[in-house]
Amino acid sequence: MAKILRFHTGEPHHNGFTPEARQRWEGIPPDVRELLLANAYCAVCKDVTTILQPGGTMDHGALVLRGHCATCGHPVARVVD
Ligand SMILES: [Zn+2]
């Protein structure tokens, strides 16, 4: 029997982005966004990786992207100044 994933309705953000972070993220050119996602450092792989399923929050004026390492699945984050 399949597990049913339950999502809260009325969440203020989509894909893990807060409204402020999403606005900031969407203000970045698509090609730059791709570069940012493809150049995150994974502490487990000790190498550069791609962030999968990215989300974001704002922290003291900087956008913090959070997602999972494309190689090992470990949570990775990177700050976008
Ligand atoms: Zn990794």
Image (cartoon, rainbow, N blue to C red):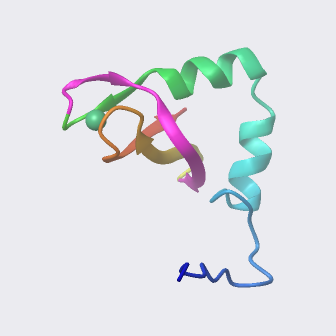
Secondary structure mostly seen in magenta is strand
**Residue at position x 60%, y 78% from top?**
5
Q: Which one is nearer the viewer's eye here, 40 or 72?
A: 72
Locate residue 61 relative to residue 29 in the image: left or right: left
- Is residue 27 rendered to the left or right of residue 5? right
Kindly identify the residue that appears in the image at 68 percent across and 51 percent down. Answer: 21
At 80% from the left and 82% from the top, the residue drawn is: 10
**Left or right of residue 72, residue 68 in this image:** right
In this view of the protein, which residue sits in the foreground, 56 or 71?
71
The image shows residue 32, relative to residue 25, as above or below, that is above
To which quarter of the image does residue 33 belong? Answer: top right
Whether residue 72 sits left or right of residue 17 in the image: it is left
Residue nearest the viewer, comparing 78 with 75: 75
The furthest residue to the front: 1
Q: Is residue 51 magenta?
A: yes
Within the displayed image, which quadrant is ligand 1 positioned in?
A: top left
Q: Position of residue 35 (x, y in %)?
A: 58, 17
Q: Where does the image place residue 6, in percent across and percent down from the top left?
A: 63, 83
Q: Which residues are magenta?
A: 45-59
